[in-house]
Image: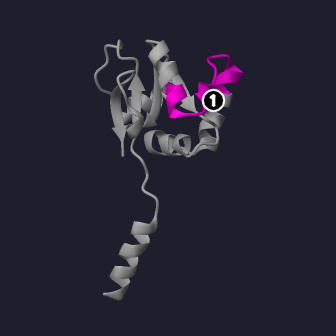
Amino acid sequence: MKQLLFASLLLAALPAQAEIVVVVNPANPASRMFTEQAAQFFLGKSNQFTPIDQGKESAIRRDFYQKATGKTLAQVEAVWAKIEFSGKGTMPKSFGSDAAVKKAVAADPSAIGYIEKASVDDSVKVLLTLP
């Protein structure tokens, strides 16, 4: 019983991870997206959308890539290095906050980004929620 109580207290003390949502411009006709589709856009396998990244050292970026692609940031950077070296694309632009990502997505009908669910407002449309 003491072990169960200790485990419960330990879990309660850990910071809760925020839900991450994949967002697009409200004018975009898409209405939903699967995780595998989002991964394609953020790994340069499709150019249907223009990916917008969070800041390089941000926790949300690390969590997004782990949840959406199953890759670490180092692995993602290696993928983009190959793409850039071959001349087939350039790494997504990155922005330092949810507000900046929302602004960039709202300004470009072809953009796709990710933010914390709590940051969603009418300037973007949610296509996917990553727990």
Classify residue 94 by image quadrant.
Answer: top right
Q: Which residue is labeled 1 in the image?
A: 80
Indicate whether 43 appears above or below 117: above
* Residue kind at label 1, given as amino acid type: Trp
> Please, which residue is most extreme toward the right here?
85
99 is within the stretch colored magenta: yes
- Mark 1 neighbour class, 10 Å CA radius: few under 14, some 14 to 19, many 20 or more: many
Is 23 in front, or is 50?
A: 23
Q: Residue at x 67, y 22 (%)?
A: 84
Residue 76 screen position, x and y as percent? 59, 37
Residue 125: x percent and y percent?
A: 35, 23
Asked where in the image residue 1 lies, by quadrant, the reply is: bottom left
87 displayed left or right of 27: right
Locate residue 27: give its quadrant: top left
Q: How many marks?
A: 1
Q: Which residues are magenta?
A: 82-101
